[in-house]
């Protein structure tokens, strides 16, 4: 005999929630893991959990219309003969040609150039469009070595050695066959239309000592002119920063787990790495312990969306930030104007993340010539430039309100934390106190 309790409504499990049940069914039906683009979707401690205090009697604010607040940054001041000078501390992160269309790469270069900042190549090499339209172009040197050649090392304005990415520290990249067009195949020296996996570690390294040798090789190839960056995913930021610096990096790029990716296993994106909020202070501590904070610059990324995020990252000790996902949105990614087409793909604007499939209605994460032609690189570049300008103005507004005449003068003391987690991770006092977990007393 079955018993139905009429007083208690049906109750779903918090552990086996609808999304979990759907994923179990999907795995059972297909036998393959879920691959997608973009960053973590779960809620994580983030910059939203920090607030600026602003000036009042004990601090003196600056007047917005009369008093200057500098936003410039110089990257690569340690060893490079030709450091990179940016008008804004917001750079465009490395995103590969292959993952992105040629037009999207060109638009990133155009937007960054108007804004006075740099853009970055990615797995798969340098395209002529992006070199031609980027005043300052950082060339990634990746484990896969796809598209790598000494000529492009010399054509670049800086070199970024990629050890890892925040979305997948310890993991390699993927580019599915749908996106391996003739041009992508030719640049990567791979067969057309076949799924490709990028290596998770550099083929000629067995440990950190090899990084030092590699940096020296790259300096010789580029005549000690170009700044050498080292990019790591947020996993052990103190030691990774210290090792990169010891190996001779000019700049450390630290990418938290919110960081976007073109194509990675969902289980990886959601479960490996640390939020950028938890990574910045240990990295800054490593630089300070080595006496090189501000001499070796720190670029941080992973979920940066606004001038407030930029200002908070800088207040925690970063010199600059990098944006990936937000730059794609500025170009036109996930725009509701394509809603009918997103629906046909079984998704909706704002949730579209099947970037690996190459069917992007906005023409950004695709190699399909018809879809790619939808993106006008000139107009998209202008949108990106506008967005970068707004973010810079926002960060400046906040800095002035804190009494700072340079974004780099923002400091931890300007911040308070809204949650215990954020207080502990960012080592910022909980709002209304002078205490954070791990620090004694009130
Ligand atoms: C479409 C796409 C492609 C990417 N390709 C690369 C790449 O080739 N090399 C790399 O180091 N990182 C790559 N990334 C990661 C970005 O460089 C950056 O670390 C990340 O996007 C920053 O986080 P955000 O997207 O939240 O701004 C890619 C990210 C996206 C969204």
Image: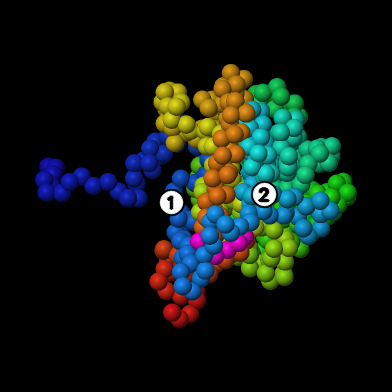
Q: In which quarter of the image is residue 261?
A: top right
Q: Residue at x 86, y 52 (%)?
A: 224
Expressed as whole percent of the image width and height from the top left, the position of residue 97 reads 67, 33
Query: Residue 87's mark?
Result: 2
Expressed as whole percent of the image width and height from the top left, the position of residue 257 reads 55, 51
Q: Which residue is drawn at 75% across and 26% down?
A: 186
Q: How crowded is mark 1: few (under 14 residues within 10 Å), some or many (20 or more)?
A: few
Q: Which of 290 and 181 is in front in this view?
A: 290
| Quadrant (top left/top right/bottom left/bottom right) for the C terminus | bottom left
Magenta stretch in the rendered image: 401-406
CA gap, disc 1 and disc 2: 32 Å
| Quadrant (top left/top right/bottom left/bottom right) for the N terminus | top left
Q: In which quarter of the image is residue 107?
A: top right
Q: Main secondary structure of the magenta part?
A: loop
Q: Is residue 73 above or below residue 386?
A: below
Q: Disc 1 designates what residue?
A: 43
**Residue 264 seen in this snapshot:** no
Ligand 1: quadrant of the figure: top right
């Amino acid at each position: 005999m079955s018993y139905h309790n009429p007083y208690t409504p049906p109750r779903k499990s918090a552990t086996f929630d609808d999304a979990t049940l759907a994923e179990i069914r999907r795995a059972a039906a297909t036998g393959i893991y879920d691959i997608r683009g973009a960053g973590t979707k779960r809620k994580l401690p983030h910059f939203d959990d920090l607030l600026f205090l602003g000036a009042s009697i004990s601090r003196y604010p600056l007047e917005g219309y009369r008093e200057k607040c500098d936003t410039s940054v110089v990257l690569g001041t340690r060893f490079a003969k030709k450091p990179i000078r940016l008008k804004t501390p917001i750079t465009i992160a490395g995103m590969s040609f292959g993952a992105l269309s040629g037009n999207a790469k060109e638009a990133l270069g155009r937007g960054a150039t108007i804004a006075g900042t740099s853009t970055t190549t990615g797995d798969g090499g340098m395209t002529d469009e992006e070199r031609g339209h980027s005043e300052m172009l950082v060339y990634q040197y990746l484990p896969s070595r796809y598209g790598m050649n000494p000529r492009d090392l010399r054509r670049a304005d800086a070199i970024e050695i990629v050890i890892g990415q925040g979305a997948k520290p310890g993991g390699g990249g993927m580019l599915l066959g749908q996106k391996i067009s003739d041009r992508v195949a030719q640049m990567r020296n791979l067969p057309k239309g076949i799924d490709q996996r990028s290596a998770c570690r550099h083929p000629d390294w067995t440990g950190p000592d090899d990084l030092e040798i590699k940096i020296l090789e790259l300096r010789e190839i580029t005549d000690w002119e170009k700044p050498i960056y080292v990019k790591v995913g947020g996993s052990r930021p103190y030691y990774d920063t210290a090792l990169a610096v010891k190996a001779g990096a000019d700049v450390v790029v630290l990418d938290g787990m919110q960081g976007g990716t073109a194509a990675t296993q969902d289980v990886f994106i959601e479960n490996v790495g640390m939020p950028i909020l938890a990574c910045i202070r240990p990295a800054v501590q490593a630089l300070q312990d080595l006496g090189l904070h501000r001499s070796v610059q720190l670029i941080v990324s992973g979920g940066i969306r606004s001038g407030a995020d930029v200002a908070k990252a800088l207040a925690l000790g970063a010199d600059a930030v990098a944006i990936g996902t937000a730059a794609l949105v500025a170009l036109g990614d996930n725009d509701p104007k394509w809603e009918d087409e997103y629906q046909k793909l079984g998704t909706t604007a704002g949730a579209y993340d099947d970037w690996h499939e190459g069917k992007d209605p906005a023409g950004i994460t695709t190699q399909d010539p018809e879809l790619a032609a939808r993106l006008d690189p000139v107009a998209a570049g202008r949108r990106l430039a506008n967005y970068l300008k707004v973010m810079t103005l926002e960060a400046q507004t906040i800095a002035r309100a804190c009494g700072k005449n340079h974004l780099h003068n923002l400091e931890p003391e300007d911040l308070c934390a809204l949650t215990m987690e954020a207080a502990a991770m960012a080592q910022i006092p909980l709002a209304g106190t002078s205490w954070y977990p791990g620090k004694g007393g009130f």
